[in-house]
Amino acid sequence: MGTLAGVVLTLLTVIASFDRVTAKLDASDIWKDYNHVQTSCDTANCASGGCLYENCEQPVSCTGGMCFFRKCKSAICEGGACLFDQTASSKCPGGACRFQNMATTLAEGYCTGGACTLDDQAHPASFAATLSE
């Protein structure tokens, strides 16, 4: 029985140290090392996720998540965890998206999935209960 208790104690120690390591993982670290797949604007939806759309004139979407939209006219991220860079009409029903270098104001309903950021700062998912300045 002493050996089993030792194994359990070792396992609990490993799990506890694993939790401390994963707690330090930052979303920016994931994006820094992730290689998106260059995708044609003719491919209207990225079902597998991880696509890179650039300069798309027509609407594009990402049901797979983790897509990167750069300088597109209109994009939607249903899978969540996408990055919108200089993309005018963008929405994130999947949540946890990053919006950066936005030339236009984010519209009501831009992040119905919640937990989105604007220029790496937490940003409200809805403006309905606030007054404008």
Image (cartoon, rainbow, N blue to C red):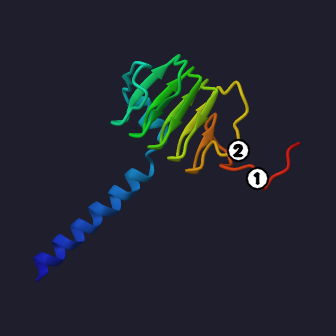
Q: Residue 110 lies in what quarter of the image?
A: top right
Between 92 and 133, the residue placed more toward the observer is 92
Depicted 67 relative to depicted 25: above or below: above
The local crowd at label 1, few if under 14, some if 14 to 19, many if 20 or more residues have their Cα within 10 Å, is few
Between 56 and 133, the residue placed more toward the observer is 56
Q: Tell me the CA gap for discs 2 and 1.
A: 7 Å
* Disc 2 secondary structure class: loop
> What residue lies at 65% left-to-right and 46% top-to-bottom?
109
Which residue corresponds to mark 1?
Answer: 128
Residue 124 appears at what percent x and percent y?
68, 49
Residue type for callout 1? Ala
Residue type for callout 2? Glu
Sequence-wise, the earlier of marks 2 and 1 is 2
> What residue lies at 69% left-to-right and 50% top-to-bottom?
126
* Disc 1 secondary structure class: loop
Which residue corresponds to mark 2?
Answer: 108
Q: Name the image quarter holding the N terminus.
A: bottom left
In the picture, measured across the screen, residue 124 lies left or right of residue 27, that is right
Residue 60 appears at what percent x and percent y?
49, 28
Residue 120 appears at what percent x and percent y?
61, 37
In the picture, measured across the screen, residue 41 lies left or right of residue 11, that is right
> What residue lies at 59% left-to-right and 44% top-to-bottom?
116
> What residue lies at 47% left-to-right and 33% top-to-bottom?
61
Q: Name the image quarter holding the C terminus.
A: top right
In the picture, measured across the screen, residue 5 lies left or right of residue 131, that is left
Depicted 52 relative to depicted 123: above or below: above
Asked whether the residues under the numbered discs 2 and 1 touch, taking CB atoms below 8 Å apart as contact, a structural biologist would say yes
